[in-house]
Image: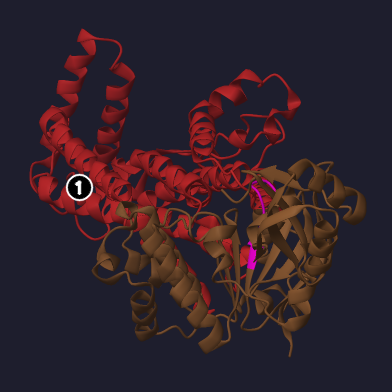
């Protein structure tokens, strides 16, 4: 299957500063890809390059095989996007705003506009001036505008901004539906991993213009289960002696947290670890093993709190 | 072509859905009525001359003007030119036509500078406001080239200028007719031309005075459009364009001792000078020279707008 979007060693230099330092990744059709990173990591710059608002310094971006550099019109015809805030003409109604964008692409019927209005749930508010919309309503109008032409690739930049939990759940709902039912590839950027984690198939973490990790969400296959690090909590006594053993025999830096040792370890190696502790006369009261959440992992990777 | 018309339609909608555009038209209507009322009250123009006694009427008018000249010198030259025109009618035995709708329309030509002002405001905003509102991002991520979007905006500005001009002409004619009555389909009038006094068609004169005014209008609108798309800032574009529109002649006057003054845009925008026989006001200038200079400026303005709009990244604020 052809990739919906393909970034090939994309670089962007502004002035002398390298903002994006060679991004390469692929987004498949029907996949929801979370593009996560702290503010200033280069998410919006990358998205601006995807939609042709900024030129690439080096590399290429292909949308369904069409390069945004050489075949822009063909490439962008398959893309619907919100870039940063969904800014609309405040002096026109939501409906007029949609009509305005509909006129720029051939073949969008009145019926289609009505359809997307219903999909994003704007209802009667569509007749009101966009200037009176709340941020949440503008997000919906922004998504409606991006969906008008049935794009194969949907790019949503911080779509959960300004939405209440109910609104986020709603977005999650139709993002999943678009991906599974209409095979749309969806790229969602956010600095809040927790808000988008549940709607994504894969998560890419960007920091300082570099992709530092790409991770599948809900990956439950046998192989990954054993290799993925699990979070282990041990209630032991004496604790300081146990820490010493973990360090010398297993090269683990455990942290003492509320009388429990906390560390990450591969699940299938835990029994031998416990055996070794018991043999060295450490009393074990409780063992808690949980799969390390993406949050924990990315917290380590990025080394700063982007999870918020 | 079909989608270009849709782009134009979009631009016109965005222009006319705004109150500020309608306020401009309101100002034009009020000013035209005001001018008509003031003309009626203070000028008391003769709207028709008697078929039998028009000669005595003109002689009486001249006598009254001569009388006025004794009181104050400052209106003397103005009055003298009316006296001269009246004598031309008498000498050539032409019955003058009364003041009416078409002549009022011709006299309203200075309002063209107001249209220039409005067009500058529209031109300055049409690109810059998209950047200010942030809507430019959603505008550009369509399967339409940036050049085409820019062209639709420029054509919209010119379209606005012409529409407003036609509005002013029709409005002046209608208000002129209400206040002063009709003066025929193609009335004639004695005017000062390069060869001295001449009996000319008012319609022709109206077309030429508005036509010459259009040159300046289009140049200033294009200039404002250029500043707007280069700096993406409408206040800057309005400010600079209006400043230059009013200060243009002073700038030319200030540098008039230098030979390169003739290359300044504003030394060339008033092509009417050539038809009035003042063609030698700066050495080396002719109608052809001025048109060439105007075209060069025009092309530079458009190329700069195009380069900055199509080549530059649309980055954050």
Q: Is residue A37 magenta?
A: yes
| Residue located at (40% from left, 65% from top) | A140
| Residue located at (24% from left, 69% from top) | A124
Residue B195 placement, left or right of A137: right
Residue A232 placement, left or right of A192: right
Considering only vertical position in the picture, is A87 above or below B62?
below
The N terminus of chain B sits in image quarter = bottom right
> Residue B160 placed where, x, y %?
41, 56
Subunit bearing disc 1: B
> Residue B156 placed where, x, y %?
46, 60
Q: Is residue B106 magenta?
A: no
> Residue B108 placed where, x, y %?
30, 42
Q: Give the range drawn in magenta.
A: A34-41
> Residue B128 placed where, x, y %?
52, 47
| Residue located at (44% from left, 83% from top) | A108
Residue A94 placement, left or right of A186: left
Q: The red chain is which one?
A: B
Which residue was labeled with disc 1?
A: B97
Quadrant hosting residue A22: bottom right
Q: Mark 1 packing: few (<14 Cα in 10 Å), some, or many (20+)?
A: some
Considering only vertical position in the picture, is A174 above or below A244?
below
Q: Can residue A79 be seen in this view?
A: yes
Please tell me whether mark 1 sits on a helix, a strand or a loop. Answer: loop
Q: The brown chain is which one?
A: A
Considering only vertical position in the picture, is A308 above or below B10?
above
Q: Is the magenta stretch mostly helix, strand or loop?
A: loop
Closer-to-camera residue (B102/A15): A15
The C terminus of chain B sits in image quarter = top right
Closer-to-camera residue (A43/A294): A294
Residue A20 placement, left or right of A127: right
């Amino acid at each position: 299957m052809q990739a919906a979007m393909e970034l090939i060693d994309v670089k962007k230099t502004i002035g002398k500063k390298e903002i994006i330092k060679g991004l390469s990744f692929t987004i498949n059709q029907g996949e929801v890809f979370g593009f996560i990173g702290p503010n200033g990591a280069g998410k919006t710059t990358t998205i601006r390059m995807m939609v042709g608002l900024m030129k690439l310094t080096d590399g290429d971006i292909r949308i369904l095989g069409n390069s945004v550099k050489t075949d822009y019109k063909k490439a962008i015809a398959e893309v619907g996007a919100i870039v940063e805030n969904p800014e609309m003409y405040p002096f026109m109604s939501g409906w007029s705003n949609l009509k305005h964008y509909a006129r720029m692409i051939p073949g969008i019927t009145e019926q289609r506009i009505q359809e997307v209005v219903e999909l994003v749930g704007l209802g009667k508010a569509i007749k009101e001036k966009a200037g009176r919309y709340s941020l949440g309503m503008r997000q919906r109008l922004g998504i409606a505008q991006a969906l008008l032409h049935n794009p194969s690739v949907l790019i949503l930049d911080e779509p959960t901004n300004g939405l209440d939990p109910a609104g986020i759940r709603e977005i999650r709902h139709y993002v999943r539906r678009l991906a599974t039912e209409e095979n749309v590839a969806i790229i969602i950027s956010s600095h809040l991993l927790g808000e988008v984690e549940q709607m994504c198939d894969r998560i890419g973490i960007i920091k300082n213009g570099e992709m530092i990790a790409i991770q599948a969400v809900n990956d439950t296959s046998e192989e990954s289960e054993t290799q993925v690090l699990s979070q282990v909590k041990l209630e032991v006594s004496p604790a300081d002696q146990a820490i010493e053993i973990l360090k010398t025999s297993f090269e683990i830096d455990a942290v003492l947290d509320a009388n429990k040792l906390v560390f990450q370890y591969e699940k299938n190696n835990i029994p031998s670890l416990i055996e070794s502790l018991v043999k060295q006369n450490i009393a074990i009261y409780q063992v808690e093993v949980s799969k390390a959440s993406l949050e924990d992992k990315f917290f380590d990777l990025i080394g700063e709190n982007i999870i918020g | 072509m079909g989608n270009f018309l849709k782009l134009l339609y979009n631009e016109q909608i965005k222009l006319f859905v705004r109150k500020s555009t309608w306020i401009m038209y309101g100002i034009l209507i009020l000013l035209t009525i005001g001018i008509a009322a003031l003309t009626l009250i203070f000028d008391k123009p003769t709207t028709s001359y008697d078929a039998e006694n028009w000669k005595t009427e003109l002689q009486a008018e001249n006598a009254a003007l001569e009388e006025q000249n004794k009181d104050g010198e400052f209106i003397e030259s103005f009055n003298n030119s009316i006296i001269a025109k009246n004598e031309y009618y008498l000498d050539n035995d032409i019955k003058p036509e009364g003041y009416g709708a078409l002549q009022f329309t011709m006299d309203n030509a200075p309002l063209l500078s107001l249209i220039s002002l409005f067009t500058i405001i529209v031109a300055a905003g049409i690109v810059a406001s998209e950047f200010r509102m942030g809507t430019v991002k959603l505008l550009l991520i369509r399967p339409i080239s940036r050049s085409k979007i820019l062209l639709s905006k420029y054509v919209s500005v010119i379209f606005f200028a012409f529409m407003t001009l036609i509005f002013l002409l029709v409005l002046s004619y209608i208000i002129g007719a209400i206040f002063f009555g009709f003066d025929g389909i193609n009335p004639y009038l004695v005017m000062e031309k390069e060869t001295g006094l001449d009996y000319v068609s008012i319609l022709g004169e109206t077309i030429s005075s508005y036509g010459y005014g259009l040159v300046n209008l289009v140049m200033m609108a294009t200039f404002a459009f250029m500043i707007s798309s280069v700096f993406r800032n409408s206040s800057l574009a309005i400010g600079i364009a209006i400043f230059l529109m009013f200060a243009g002649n002073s700038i030319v006057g200030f540098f008039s001792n230098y030979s390169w003054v003739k290359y300044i845009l504003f030394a060339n925008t008033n092509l009417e000078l050539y038809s009035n026989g003042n063609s030698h006001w700066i050495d080396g200038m002719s109608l052809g020279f001025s048109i060439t200079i105007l075209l060069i400026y025009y092309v530079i303005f458009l190329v700069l707008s195009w380069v900055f709009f199509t080549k530059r990244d649309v980055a954050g604020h």
